[in-house]
Every structure is written in C-alpha cells, then in structure tokens.
Image (cartoon, helix red, strand yellow):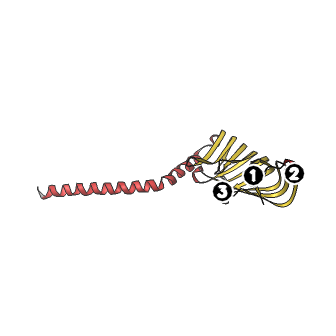
Amino acid sequence: MTGRKFRTILLVAISAILGVVTFKVGESIWQGNKKNLRNKVVKQTIEMLPESALTIKDFHRAQVDGERKVWEVFGDEARYNKEDKRLALKKARIFFYQKDDNAIEATGNEGNLWMGEGQSDLEKAQLLGNVSVSFRGYTLTTNEILYFKARNMMVLPGRVSIKGEGMELDGGQMEISLNDEVLKLNRDVKTKVVPGKLPTKGRTDEKKTG
C-alpha cells in the first residue's frame, strides 16, 4: 500500500469517526432540547397567526400526568390575546382532578387562562360572572375565582356562599388549598346549620374547613 493510499484511508476513517461523534452529540442535544424547541415553534406559530385565526369554537384543553388527568378546561369559545398572552373563554368550565379521582369543578360566564411556555401548562386562571364551584357535595357561588399554579390554590376574593347537606356558610375572601383540600373563609363568616340534615361522621370527616 502506498503512502498516499494509506493517508487517504486514514482520512476517511477519521472523518467517519468524527461523523459518529457529531451525530451522537447532536442526538443528545436534540433529546435534551426538543421540548424547548417544540415550545418555541408553538409560540412562533401563534405569533404569526392572524387575529381571525385565534378564535376556537368548542375549546378543550387538558394536562395528563401518566394515565391521570391533572386538569381539564372547556369553553364554548376561546380567543387568544397576543398582547397579554391570554386565552379568553366564553362559558368556561375547569376541572381539577384529585388523586382519589374526585374532581373540583368550577364554572363561569367568562374565563381567562394564562398558559405556560408552549401553551401546555396552566399557570393561572380566572372565572367571572355567576361562578359556581362543586366540591365534595358542597356548592360555592361567587362572582370571581382565581387559580394559581405556583400555590396550587383557588382564591375567591369576593363574597362567597356555600351550601351543603345541613349547612350553609356565607363569608368573604375564601381560599381553597388543592393539596390538602382545606377551605378557609377569612372574614365576616355567617353559619347556618340544620342538625337533622347534617351528613354522617364519615362524610363530615371528608370535608375540612378552616
């Protein structure tokens, strides 16, 4: 074998090795950043859409963790606002699914959603107008409710009326912790109890109020 042929073969071999290394590095980078890339593509696509294309009829969005739904949102109509990156819904319904398969359902005439990067996570939500929350046999009515993912909490800043088996509560500035299902009314609390209609002890233990 001549020296020229040997150098040629050596260069081909080195190029092949470098090609494999480059491919492996590229594959690693792709696997590590494909989620960010997907989110970037979604964001850029939304920004390029005309206003008329940002209205969705029969809106539905959900987040799934494994085989379990975390939350689910429905709306008769949704419109995306580019300025504050907000989804405005008509006739909104939000379900927060607990680990025991129970769900907290909140409905309102209007809704606002602030989604995370890539529109795949619910960072904050607001329901307005004839707001109703169904929670383990109790119904809460108010005019506004807010959800904050960072605290996993629902906040009802106005007047709240609560009705359940044998009990009615009325107060202001309620907080609902979704982690431990604790309800807390912070001011002007009024309570009405009908002893004969109260649930059994087992059912009462399921409900915690602060």
In the image, residue 34 lies at what x, y percent? 48, 52
Q: CA distance from mark 1 to mark 2?
A: 16 Å
- Image quarter where the N terminus lies is bottom left
What residue is disc 1 on?
202
What residue is disc 2 on?
195
Q: Secondary structure at mark 2?
A: helix
Residue at horizontal 71 percent and vertical 44 percent from the top? 93
Among the two numbered marks 1 and 3 on one chain, the one whose residue lies closer to the N terminus: 3
Q: What residue type is disc 2 on? A: Pro
Among the two numbered marks 2 and 3 on one chain, the one whose residue lies closer to the N terminus: 3
What residue is disc 3 on?
149
Q: What residue type is disc 3 on? A: Lys
**In this view, the mark in front (2 or 3):** 2
Residue at horizontal 28 percent and vertical 56 percent from the top? 17
**In this view, the mark in front (1 or 3):** 1
Q: Which mark is residue 64?
A: none
Q: Nearer the viewer, residue 137 or 170?
A: 137
